[in-house]
């Protein structure tokens, strides 16, 4: 699935935004968990804003649209960390390749931050008129990869943006952005689509439509994650983590051993483990709030806890995610979170048995 496809759960929001074309804000924060189509929304918004004959969506046939779709429109600028760009190929990555992180710091690993030099390479352009279209679009994806210096540099541009320039900050975790940066943006929150909408869409994308519901439940209702599961691209790591959390709660595992087991897979970095934990705990909270029957042993365990405890634990994970790019001891970070989970769940399990 590529950024070319506008997902059905995005259409109404995009149409509503484009109908305000003459009174748009100059900076938008597209916020929500991965797998909901925020990047796709940004691509379609940018295409329409640069189109010569919008209706209000892009016409798809004008010269501007052809340039846009071939990754060569001069009035679209995209900033991504080198690491994110390499791991997420697509149209936005093609545009981001124009602004790689400078080689000032030689490293074998691609940079996981959007650096100040990348921002500075884009900002001079906004002081001139767009080269071809009536507008200029600058997309940062994900915006939380901005380091502090880069964020402060961008902030100056957001304070006095030119009338023909629009910024889109795509964020999976807006809490990691500078508060001053968030305050300069109009926020658009992306939430889980209704299950019926996601199921209907997913059933049209996969070979066996009868598995759509099962895949969505396994993906905690996130449609693009469910599609990845259908294509065999992901899911094993999250399933392993769910079993591990259940084992900790049942007192069958030691947090230190469990953390070491997770970190054995060198292809999965600390941040990816933490994001999977975010999704699992968020799923437990949604399941509890909806009053639905527990669909897994892990949900049964979560139902022993009150919502305040689950939200508090999610805050712990969010804090770890915000620090994930810092030079931390990965083992200690995971050990601490897993030990905390065991403490929360085992103690309540024991209380039930003795109550």
Image (spheres, rainbow, N blue to C red):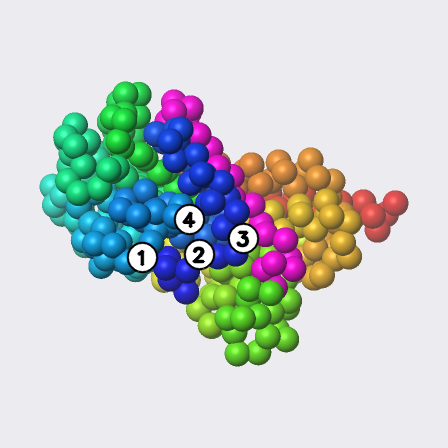
Quarter placement of the C terminus:
top right
The answer to the question of whether label 2 and label 4 lie on touching residues, with beta carbons closer than 8 A, is no
Distance Cα–Cα, label 1 vs label 3: 21 Å
* Gap between marks 2 and 1 measured at Cα: 13 Å
| Quarter of the view holding residue 233 | bottom left
Looking at the rendered structure, the secondary structure element under dot 2 is loop
Q: Closer to the camera: disc 2 or disc 1?
A: 1
**Residue found 64% across the figure and 57% down from its top:** 195
Magenta region includes residue 186: yes
Give the mark, 1 or 4, whose residue is nearer the N terminus. 4
Disc 1 to disc 4, how far (Cα)? 16 Å
For residue 318, say whether it is visible: no
Mark 2 vs mark 4: which is more N-terminal? 2
Name the mark on residue 60.
1
Q: Which mark is residue 157?
A: none
- The segment highlighted magenta reads 176-199
Q: Residue at x 57, y 78 (%)?
A: 208
User: Circle 3: is it few (<14), some (14-19), or many (20+) Cα within 10 Å?
Assistant: some
Q: Quick check: marks 1 and 4 in contact, CB under 8 Å?
A: no
Task: State the residue at coordinates (21%, 35%).
Answer: 119
Q: Earlier in the sequence, mark 4 or mark 3?
A: 3
The residue pinned by badge 3 equals: 9
Query: Which label number is shown at residue 41?
Result: 4
Q: Which residue is mark 2?
A: 6
Residue 249 visible to an observer of this rendering: yes
Q: Describe the element under mark 3 as helix, strand or loop.
A: loop
Q: Which residue occupies 17% across, 46% down?
A: 74
Residues at marks 2 and 3 touching, judged by CB atoms closer than 8 Å: no
Q: Residues within 10 Å of mark 1 (few under 14, many from 20)?
A: some
Tally of marks: 4
């Amino acid at each position: 699935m590529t950024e070319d496809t506008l997902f059905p759960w995005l259409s109404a929001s995009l149409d509503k935004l484009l109908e305000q074309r003459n009174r748009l804000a100059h900076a938008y924060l597209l916020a929500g968990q991965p797998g909901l189509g925020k990047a796709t929304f940004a691509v379609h918004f940018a295409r329409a804003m640069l189109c010569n004959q919008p209706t209000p969506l892009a016409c798809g046939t004008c010269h501007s649209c052809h340039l846009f779709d071939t990754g060569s429109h001069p009035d679209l600028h995209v900033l991504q960390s080198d690491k994110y760009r390499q791991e997420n190929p697509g149209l936005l990555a093609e545009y981001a390749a124009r602004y790689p992180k400078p080689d000032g710091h030689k490293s074998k690993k691609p940079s996981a931050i959007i650096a100040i030099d990348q921002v500075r390479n884009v900002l001079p352009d906004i002081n001139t008129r767009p080269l071809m279209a009536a507008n200029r679009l600058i997309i940062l994806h994900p915006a939380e990869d901005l380091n502090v210096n880069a964020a402060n540099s961008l902030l100056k541009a957001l304070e006095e943006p030119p009338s023909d320039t629009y910024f889109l900050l795509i964020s999976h975790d807006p809490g990691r952005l500078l508060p001053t940066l968030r305050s300069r943006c109009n926020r658009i929150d992306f939430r889980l689509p209704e299950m019926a909408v996601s199921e209907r869409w997913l059933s049209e994308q996969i070979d066996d439509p009868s598995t759509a519901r099962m895949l969505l439940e396994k993906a905690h209702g996130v449609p693009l994650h469910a599609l990845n599961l259908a294509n065999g691209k992901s899911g094993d790591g999250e399933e392993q983590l769910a079993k591990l959390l259940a084992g900790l709660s049942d007192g069958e595992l030691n947090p230190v051993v469990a953390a070491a087991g997770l970190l054995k897979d060198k292809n999965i970095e600390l941040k990816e483990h933490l994001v999977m934990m975010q999704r699992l705990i968020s799923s437990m909270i949604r399941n509890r709030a909806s009053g639905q029957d527990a669909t897994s042993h892990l949900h049964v365990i979560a139902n022993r806890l009150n919502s305040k405890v689950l939200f508090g634990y999610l805050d712990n994970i969010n804090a770890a995610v915000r620090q994930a790019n810092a030079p931390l001891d990965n083992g200690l970070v995971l050990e601490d979170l897993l030990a905390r989970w065991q403490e929360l769940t085992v103690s309540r399990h024991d209380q039930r048995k003795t109550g």
